[in-house]
Image (cartoon, rainbow, N blue to C red):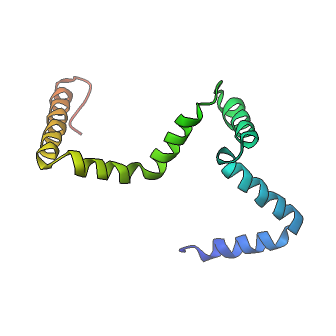
Amino acid sequence: VRNTKALERMAELVSSVDADIMGGYLRWHSVNKFASYMGKSFVDEDFNFNERILAGTEEIKPRWKRAMAFTEAALGEALGKLYCAKYFDESCKERALSIVENVRQALEDRLKEVDWMTSD
């Protein structure tokens, strides 16, 4: 922790709030944070408020899509690493880097041709 003054101030603030109010605040934040992983009634209310009302989303995604999104968020990098280790060898990496470099070079060449841009 770099800013101990912030922690000291937070401790002062928390200790000055009524315990019932603080308890309600913490319960609300806990439910709000985990509602999308709880039972159907919590999921539906969470979607209705956070997605329908606040974001304008009209329909909740099917459960399997929500589960896949959760899995991807939690394990995406690790699964990607395992997949690449199994299905891609060094020549694939070299080919991908070559493609990226070709695209980068093509973009650089095109940017040199536009009148409104300078090298600065």
Image label count: 0
Give the percent coordinates (x, y) of residue 47. Answer: 69, 36
- Residue 62 falls in which quadrant of the image? top right
Q: Could you tell me residue 36's position as x and y percent?
A: 66, 44
Q: Name the residue at 88% across, 64% down.
A: 20
Specify the quadrant that holds the C terminus: top left
Look at the image and tell me in which quarter the N terminus lies. Answer: bottom right
Q: Is residue 119 left or right of residue 70?
A: left
Question: Residue at position x 21%, y 23% from top?
Answer: 114
x%, y% of residue 30?
72, 56
- Residue closer to the observer: 113 or 48: 48
Is 63 located above or below residue 70 in the figure? above
Depth check: 9 or 37 in front?
37
> In the image, 71: left or right of 113?
right
- Relative to 45, say whether 116 is above or below: above
Task: Tell me where residue 63 appears, x and y as whole percent.
Answer: 59, 36
In the rendered image, which quarter is residue 26 located in?
bottom right
Q: Nearer the viewer, residue 101 or 111?
A: 101
**Would you say 22 lies left or right of 81 here?**
right
In this rendering, position of residue 77 left or right of residue 4 = left
| Residue visible at 25% across and 29% down in the picture | 117
